[in-house]
Amino acid sequence: MKKMKFIKVITLLTAILSIIGCTSDFEEINKDPNNLDAITPGSVLNPVLYQLAKRNALQYRAVTAPLMQAIVRTDDFIYSPFLYDLDPNIGASTWNDYYRWLNNIHEMEMVADQLQDNNYKAIALTLKAYAFSILTDTFGDIPMEEALQAENGIWYPKYTEQKDIYPILLEYLETANSLYRLDENMIYVEDILFKNEVSKWQKFTNTLQLRLLLRVSNRSEIESYSRLSRILNDPVTYPIFNSINDQAVLEISGIPPLMSPWDRPQDFNTFRYVTEFFIDNLKKTDDPRLPHFASVARGINNENYGYIGVPVDFINTPLPDSIATPSGVSQQLAVAPMIIPLMSYAELCFIQAELAYKGYISSSAEEHYNEGIQAAIEMWGLEITEDFINQTNIKYDNSLEQIMLQKYYALFFTDYQAWFEHRRTGFPKLQTTNSMLNNQEMPARLYYPLDEIDMNNKNTQEAIDRMGGNEINIKVWWAQ
């Protein structure tokens, strides 16, 4: 990739400056990124965390939310993800940003190695696993083993097959877990995710491994279920999230450099409305998240009609003329103070609920399910009562479909995870309409970016041929 030629010269400096501006909140970076003595692991960490989270939030609104029938945009019918009509370059921002920041994670790892700082090396390995997992689950085969090697003269990296990527990711996380030293402090500037609490970073590492093991659990060669059980049955060796106080959720204060991904909050929800599917499931249970996620529908004379979502097939089945404005996406989601989840405690609870439901762990699926709902709601600063959990439309019914429906809401605003989980399980069951393209079939991946096809053509074409095409219905390895 030609763009990688410039990484060693300008990426680290310009990327960091792009988010710190004139503030001194992040540690000052020396202007020679080729000199490892010029940076520290701490100086790289915060810009990486912020920029990955920012890209995640932007992509959730643009890709995941419409694909998963949470949000639709009603003013643009050219390349509409909610109709399974995807722009050929829809994944370019994720690809470019993630590889840009993976280069900086790589720098962080090398500096940590040089300084023999095990905690920062463990964090770098964790973030590598996190970033590469999102890339491979989005696209399939990706540059990995030869990626991040511009300093070695590899400008056009070959693609690694996903079946070979996942064992590497899991090994990163195993190694990271073994490296943490709880008796050694993180000595650099306070990180913006866990405030330099080493124990929380270790819990994130192991909880992330649970996510990835469940993702590939349909592939028997990984032996995911035995590995999942080993982690969950050995909390001393493998500590994981214990509550929402441990979760990897970035708090955006609105104080530079922690600014909302949207410079103009009004751009966040213009012509974007919450779907009928998303709203109706929350209305059935009087879910406290509903007013936090959506605005009320308004009539032609500004009457308050409560919460009314847009049908996915609003082209052929529009709302009554009396409704001037259906329920829109709440602007407060994009106004600081706000949150951007990387991996929540609620997600862990639903992982455990699924494993208990399938009989792989002995704990109660219902208890994990209930705790997941509570954690998902509390993540947004809201509260629930015991009566809420016990109502008919919420009470656990011993089905995977119910677990995954609540996990779907728990993953709201969390990068591509709801889409990944739908591809893995088929849940929640989403509506289909005659207006949908792609034979009404949920896309199984995103196209490789056009620049990547152009600049790294030989290697990209090899991957395309191996996977069976650069099409959105080509299933990634773990979904086959």
Image (tube, helix red, strand yellow):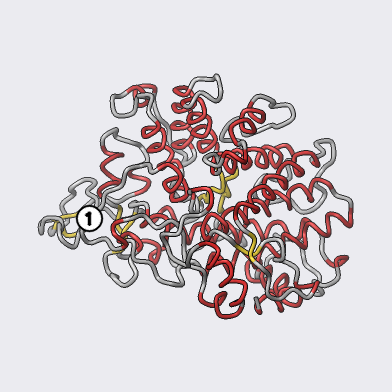
In percent of width and height, residue 326 lies at 22, 55
Q: Where is residue 36 in the image (x, y as percent from the top left)?
A: 85, 66
Q: Where is residue 47 in the image (x, y as percent from the top left)?
A: 67, 61
Residue sitting nearer the eye, 205 or 263: 205
Q: What number of labels is visible? A: 1
Residue 134, image quadrant: bottom right
Q: Is residue 72 above or below residue 175?
A: below
**Amino acid at the residue labelled 1:** Thr
Quick check: 232 above or below 437? above
Name the secondary structure under disc 1. loop
Q: Residue at position x 41%, y 59% from top?
A: 473
- Does residue 113 appear to the left or right of 218 in the view shown? right
Q: Taking 355 as reference, is 215 above or below it? A: below
Q: Position of residue 143 (x, y in %)?
A: 64, 65
Residue at point 47%, 24% (across, down):
365
Q: Which of 54 and 187 is in front in this view?
A: 54
| Nearest the eye: 346 or 168 | 168
Q: Quadrant of the N terminus?
A: bottom right
**At x 48% / y 48%, what residue is drawn?**
479
Left/right placement of residue 225 relative to residue 62 reads: right
Task: Return the residue found at the far left.
Answer: 321
Please give the residue where the numbered disc 1 appears in the rendered image: 433
Rendered image quadrant of residue 281:
top left
Q: Quadrant of residue 46?
A: bottom right
Q: How crowded is mark 1: few (under 14 residues within 10 Å), some or many (20 or more)?
A: some
